[in-house]
Amino acid sequence: MADHYYARIKIGGTLRADDVSRFCAALGIHPGDVNGRISNGCFVFENDEASYGRFEELEDLCRELELTFVRESDGKYGFSAEVVFWAPGMDEAGQALADHDNNLQVDMEDVRAIREALRADDIPEARHLCERVVVDLPEFPLFRIGREVT
């Protein structure tokens, strides 16, 4: 049996009208509920009992339909809180550890490596290490439903 805990996903981009039923099926909602879940230009869905804090079917569908998403999941037991994101043009989804307020976190070993590079006055290496650990979430296009494809 899977562990279930809170997850929230924000989605942006153009959902074709002929894909609305697949989108809603992945969420388990009625198509008439889509507009009521739009907040600040993004589609937002929350579930207190998401399996492992994920929306696997929905996330796969978002990639297939080229919809940008950011998922925030609480941690529980051996699972850390995390933020997972994807936008068109990315090969794989990005992931970062988060605290329980969904603030992105940096591994202490990475911070120590940056500190050591700075102590050694190796600015190019410190810059490289910083660029490697900094996570930038994708810009969100407005969520909207487009016309049917003919």
Image (spheres, rainbow, N blue to C red):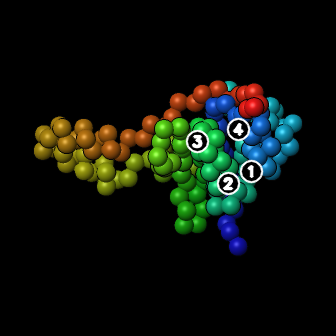
Between residues 35 and 135, which one lies in front from this camera angle? 35
| Residue wearing tag 4 | 44
Q: CA distance from mark 4 to mark 3?
A: 10 Å
Secondary element type, mark 2: helix
Q: CA distance from mark 2 to mark 1?
A: 6 Å
Q: Quadrant of the C terminus?
A: top right
**Which amino acid type is marked by label 1?**
Ala
Q: How many marks?
A: 4
Do we see residue 101 in this rendering? no
Q: CA distance from mark 1 to mark 3?
A: 16 Å
* Residue at x 54%, y 48% (from the top left corner): 84
Place of residue 8 in the rendered image (x, y in percent of width and height, measured from the top left) = 66, 45
Q: First in sequence, mark 2 or 4: give its number.
A: 4
**Which amino acid type is marked by label 4?**
Val
Q: First in sequence, mark 3 or 2: give its number.
A: 2
Which of the 4 image quadrants contains residue 129? top left
The mark lying in front, picked from 2 and 4, is 2
Which of the 4 image quadrants contains residue 23? top right
Q: Which mark is residue 26?
A: 1
In the image, residue 63 above or below residue 75: above
**Which amino acid type is marked by label 2?**
Glu
Between residues 84 and 111, which one lies in front from this camera angle? 84
User: From this viewpoint, which residue is outermost toward the front?
Assistant: 150
Neighbourhood count class around disc 2 (C-alpha, 10 Å): few under 14, some 14–19, many 20 upward? few
Q: Which mark is residue 57?
A: 2
Place of residue 53 in the rendered image (x, y in percent of width and height, measured from the top left) = 64, 56
CB of mark 3 within 8 Å of CB of mark 2? no
Q: Which mark is residue 70?
A: 3
* Residue at x 73%, y 53% (from the top left corner): 48
Q: CA distance from mark 2 to mark 4?
A: 16 Å
CB of mark 2 within 8 Å of CB of mark 1? yes
